[in-house]
């Protein structure tokens, strides 16, 4: 199955996230279920995204 990951076909699932209330960005963490590779995505919050 790691062959698919080497070709760029990862199977990402959410692994948590971080939101700082004083900031207008949110970090979302993902982990590949096949190979264990991790990635982080930084997303700009919208006005109704604050939680």
Image (tube, grey):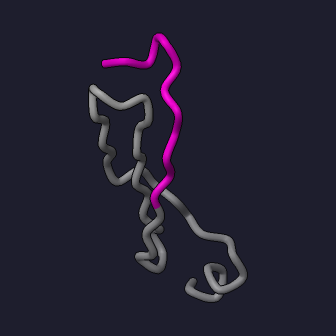
Relative placement, left or right, of 30 versus 17 is: right
Q: Between 34 and 16, which is closer to the camera in this rendering?
A: 16
* The stretch drawn in magenta includes residue 10: no
User: From what the image shows, is residue 17 above or below residue 51?
Assistant: below
Measured along the vertical axis of the image, is residue 2 above or below residue 11?
below
Q: Position of residue 18 (x, y in %)?
A: 30, 43
5 or 24: which is nearer to us?
A: 24
Position of 33 with respect to 17 (left or right) is right
Q: Quadrant of residue 2?
A: bottom right
Residue 49 rendering spot, x and y as whole percentages: 44, 18
Q: Which residues, given as a range, are shown in magenta?
A: 40-51
Q: Nearer the viewer, residue 22 or 34?
A: 22
Residue at the extreme top:
48
- Residue 18 shown left or right of residue 47 in the figure: left
Judging depth in this view, the residue of 42 and 24 nearest the camera is 24
Q: Is residue 24 above or below residue 50?
A: below
Q: How many marks?
A: 0
Task: Please indicate whether residue 46 sits to the left or right of residue 19 in the image.
Answer: right
Percent position of residue 44, x then y: 52, 33
Q: Who's the residue at 33% across and 45% down the image? A: 17
Quadrant of the frame with the N terminus: bottom right
Quarter the C terminus occupies: top left
Residue shown at the point (31%, 36%) measured from the top left: 19
Q: Residue at x 72, y 82 (%)?
A: 7
């Amino acid at each position: 199955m790691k062959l698919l990951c080497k070709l760029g076909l990862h199977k990402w699932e959410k692994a948590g996230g971080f939101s700082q209330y004083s900031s207008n960005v949110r970090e979302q963490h993902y982990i590949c279920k096949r190979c264990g590779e991790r990635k982080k995505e930084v997303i700009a919050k919208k006005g109704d995204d604050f939680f």
